[in-house]
Amino acid sequence: MTHFTFRVAFLALLALPLSLSAQEKPKPAEKPAEKPAPGDALIEAYLKRETARISERFMDGAKTRAEWEGKRDRLKREYFDMLGLWPLPEKTPLHATVTGTLERGDVVIEKLHFQSKPGLYVTGNLYRPKKNDKKLPTILYVCGHSSKGRDGNKTAFQDQGMWFASNGYVCLIIDTLQLGEVPGKHHGTYNLGRWWWQAMGYTPAGVECWNGVRAIDYLITRPDVDHERIGVTGISGGGASTIWIAAADERVKVAVPVSGMSDLESYVTNKVINGHCDCMLLVNTYQWEWTTIAALIAPRALLFANSDADPIFPMDGNRRIIDRLRKAYALYKKPDLVDEYVSKGGHAYRPDLRVAIFKFINKQLKNDTGEVKDVDFLPIAGAELRVFPEDKDIPPNALNGKIDESFVARAQAPLPEEGKFEAWQEKLLKELREHSFRGFPERIPAGRLVGALSDKDGQFTMMTAPGLAIKVGWEEGKPTKPMVFAVLGPDDPPINTPEWLEDTFDNEMTLCYPRGRGKLRITAKNPPNYFERSHVLLGQTLDEMRVWDTVAAFREYFTNLPGHKWIMTGRGQAGIIAAYAALLEPDMRGVVLVDPPSSHRDGPYFLNVLRVLDIPDALGLLAPKNLTIYSDDKAFDRTAEIYKRGGAADKFKRLPVKK
């Protein structure tokens, strides 16, 4: 087949000028910047617009305390859900164990571990005064990204434990998942290609939050801990965890996040996300303005501490956050319980920063406003602080290294009962819209073709959202057959018709290159995977928005070419995008899939989709539309069974993959 200049008269009627935003010219540098891909500027502009829209939604729009309190219970559930913690996990036995103690002057250090979930080990060092006979104010210290190897990153922050214990506190410092004695992973979508984290609704931020909540569960079992005087603090990744934990757990009375949070404008528009791993970020399913997370801490005491020259927590973002937080605390008429401290320098602790933190915590937990001296002690060798001294001591049942596989429960959608297919279908479609396609309207608006003529390669430009363009093409074929709407993927050529498509159809065809594909491809750079990760902070994925583009493009053709029957098709992951487009678009009558994946673990990746269903069930939802699958995968036996139970067995066909 050859490219065919499609219905020029029709296009001329639709023609409107197209203006694509241009990327700013890079500043002169010693080394030339990498040349952006053709579609980068378009997607960056889209992300900027989405960020601005969502950034208006601080505290879900609440302007009064009554409005905020009315929303708070729902928002708390949404918050847990976005961490992968809803429904809240069972608080299983901690099996807390002290494996050894050290003494340094007037301080005793207990080396301990507990299980926040069965097999999820949390290792820590607890610092306490040697002489004490009463309940003490207590600090949970959560670590930043300091690589201390086998010793665990808790050993990098021992100065914090020593100061607190020397000044009348109990202080528990716990290892993180990524850099603890029993290591797991923080970098799944940053550089490990674990895109199924998006499909699972998994983030290691959820693990760090839950480990902190369970650490407090452990602390309140101790006779030396005052339950009413518990604080949490940490820097960098520990600053983020401070906010996760304090927002989740009302037992935290004071929180001091240090260089641990920015806002969507910084993360997405200014690309600060490129400097952060996944533990700093939740899955923003409900499209929150980011500071709303910290607002859940109000009106408990909060010091927002930062540094003025920190490139990964820039001051413009810090200013926006503290301004929003002051408004939240003003609703409670407690402006004195939120404050900021800004140190001069980069991303690190300095004496003035530590002293400011200690003074704030002293005031809030001890009502002590006296002078504070910085910590002064001889560091302890990391190996002495190990909870598990030798590798052989690490529990064989530890799941830390694969906790991402099970931390969020994967759904097992039931098969429809006889005679109840429509109810089954309605329920799962509702759950998909709530958890995966939450930002989609009931009907996606039709796209808009622009330009009277195709470009030199016979392709047309179509706007599928304000300022967002994709490419579509047209291939001639037998006009007596249904028209084919083909969704193309990353392995398909950006101009010519793919061989698999020519081998499968001789119909007239529309070729759809959804965002980031074809001639308007976007940069794929690992790490930091900016485009793929930024979408999740805005409550969507690139693949979800490719479904949007597909529906919008199809609706334009369907509306302006009445009387035609249409078949949606695609190969591999693009085929599943086509299937979901047909699922969301009632006017699409049939679907043909060539060698599709059988699980969303292998893509395409939609937020939380594996918490609802997997691909065989999603394809079953298409019934009674015609569905043909070229695949030998037995997983699609389930799809056949669903079609049968839906009374549409004759509409389902499975054929061997063409070699």
Image (spheres, rainbow, N blue to C red):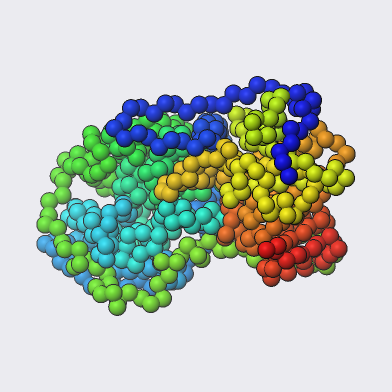
Left or right: residue 634 versus residue 338 is right
Residue 532, placed above or below residue 182: above
Q: Is residue 625 visible?
A: yes
Left or right: residue 549 versus residue 155 is right
Residue 433, placed above or below residue 151: above
Q: Residue at x 49, y 37 (%)?
A: 37
Instruction: State the residue lying farthest toward the front.
Output: 2
Measured from the top left, where is residue 637 in percent x and y?
73, 69
Q: Is residue 225 visible?
A: no
Measured from the top left, where is residue 157 in percent x and y?
24, 54
Q: Nearer the viewer, residue 247 or 483?
A: 483
Q: Nearer the viewer, residue 381 or 643?
A: 643
Q: Based on the displayed image, in which of its 4 quarters is residue 587 positioned?
A: top right
The quarter of the image holding the N terminus is top right
Q: Residue at x 86, y 63 (%)?
A: 650
Residue 209, placed above or below residue 548: below
Q: Based on the displayed image, in which of its 4 quarters is residue 15 positioned?
A: top right
Q: Nearer the viewer, residue 427 or 64?
A: 427
Q: Residue at x 40, y 60 (%)?
A: 185
The quarter of the image holding the C terminus is bottom right
Measured from the top left, where is residue 175 in percent x and y?
32, 60
Instruction: State the residue lying farthest toward the top.
Output: 17
Q: Residue at x 85, y 42 (%)?
A: 479
Measured from the top left, where is residue 240 in percent x and y?
38, 47
Q: Nearer the viewer, residue 529 or 205?
A: 529
Left or right: residue 4 versus residue 317 is right
Left or right: residue 537 versus residue 335 is right
